[in-house]
Amino acid sequence: MKLPGKLALCLAVLLTAPALGASDTVLTLTGAIPNDEVSLTREDLLDMPQQKMVTATTVTDGRSTFEGFLIRDLLEAHEAGGDIVIARALNDYKIEIPISDFERFDVIGALFMDGEPLSPRDKGPIWIVYPRDDHPELQDIRYDTRWVWQLVSLHVQ
């Protein structure tokens, strides 16, 4: 079967394009850090100490098991200063999060939910998750808005 020229060209480009992999940047850290900007891959984030958390969310049914790195560990590893982090999602949603949240609570950058890797189709590749069930004060809309899914950058101020 012969394909029309434009369709054949598009198909050839799609078939030869590199697939996204472990070496692609999934999170950018900028702002008040010594290196000005750090590009992190999924592999970089998996190399950090991993934590598990079981908690309910306002956007999923029941309780789920989340696995990922502590946000405070990421900030400490890159010598972040400042008082707030501006978290930005793939869809350009932005929210200011006090760094004190990461010091006070074991907030994770979840890479897995219920044993499955998070993908952009389902809140991934990174979802900021608070230990909601462990702290009654976290069951408040102010904290719910800080659960950034499809996280792509953290800007420290």
Image (cartoon, helix red, strand yellow):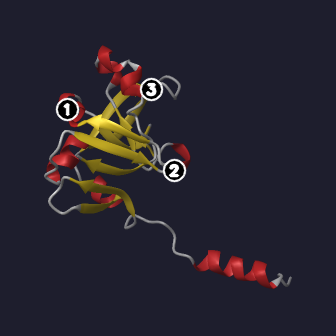
Q: Quadrant of the N terminus?
A: bottom right
Q: Name the outermost residue toward the top.
A: 136
- Point out the frontmost of discs 2 and 1: 1
Residue placed at 30% from the left, 36% from the top? Answer: 97
Badge 1 amino acid: Ser
Disc 1 target residue: 100
**Image-based side of 60 in relation to 143, left or right:** right
Q: Position of residue 130 (x, y in %)?
A: 33, 30
- Residue 43, picture quadrant: bottom left
Between residue 128 and residue 54, name the one nearer to us: 128
> Does 145 appear above or below 135?
below
**Image-based side of 77 in relation to 62, left or right:** left
Residue placed at 41% from the left, 21% from the top? Answer: 141
Describe the element under mark 3 as helix, strand or loop: loop
Between residue 57 and residue 147, name the one nearer to us: 147
Mark 1 Cα shell of 10 Å, populated few (<14), some (14-19), many (≥20): few
Disc 3 target residue: 57
Pointer 3 or 2: first along the chain: 3
Mark 1 and mark 3: span between their CA atoms? 21 Å
Mark 3 and mark 2: span between their CA atoms? 18 Å
> Does 81 appear above or below 27?
above
Disc 2 target residue: 120
**Image-based side of 145 in relation to 50, left or right:** right
Pointer 1 or 3: first along the chain: 3
Which disc is residue 133 wearing?
A: none
